[in-house]
Amino acid sequence: GTAADIMKVAMWQVAQLGYPIVNQVHDELLLEVPSTIHDSPIVTAMLTMPEPLCRVPLAISVGRGYTWLETYEKETKYS
């Protein structure tokens, strides 16, 4: 349904930025991004991504770390 369509668009948007998608689990994308890159290009892509599909604002969070656990601990939420 709609959630799968939103994820497909999100994956396409991230691919356009040139960052490899390491893993996708349910509603999460795990990317490999150089530590010198700030979150802003990813956040911009993710915040503008759902506009054509959904009229309800979606909550988006970005985390950074060397392990998946670290990304949750250093998570920043956007909406």
Image (cartoon, grey):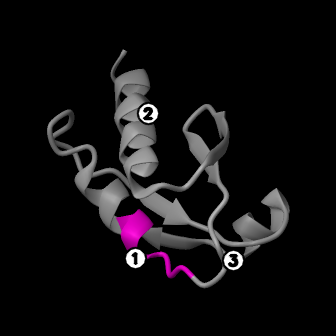
Compare marks 1 and 2 and give the one earlier in the sequence: 2
**Mark 3 = which residue?**
74
> Which-is-in-front pick, marks 3 and 1?
1
**Mark 2 = which residue?**
7
Residue sitting at x 45%, y 45%:
15
> Which-is-in-front pick, marks 2 and 3?
2
Q: Residues within 10 Å of mark 3 (few under 14, many from 20)?
A: few
Q: Amino acid at mark 2?
A: Met
Q: Position of residue 29 (x, y in %)?
A: 59, 46
Q: Position of residue 33 (x, y in %)?
A: 62, 66
Report the label total: 3
- Of the 4 image quadrants, the one containing the C terminus is bottom left
Q: Amino acid at mark 3?
A: Lys
- Of the 4 image quadrants, the one containing the N terminus is top left
**Mark 1 = which residue?**
40
Q: CA distance from mark 1 to mark 2?
A: 19 Å
Residue sitting at x 17%, y 45%:
51
In-image side of 56 versus 9 (left or right) = left
User: Which range is magenta?
Assistant: 37-43
Residue placed furthest toward the front: 18
In depth, the one of 42 and 18 nearer the eye is: 18
In-image side of 20 versus 53 (left or right) = right
Q: Secondary structure at mark 3?
A: loop
Compare marks 2 and 3 and give the one earlier in the sequence: 2
Q: CA distance from mark 3 to mark 1?
A: 15 Å
Compare marks 3 and 1 and give the one earlier in the sequence: 1
Please say if 79 is above or below 34: above
Residue 69 quadrant: bottom right
Q: Amino acid at mark 1?
A: Ser
Q: Is 70 in the magenta? A: no
Please say if 46 is above or below 75: above
Q: Position of residue 49 (x, y in %)?
A: 28, 48
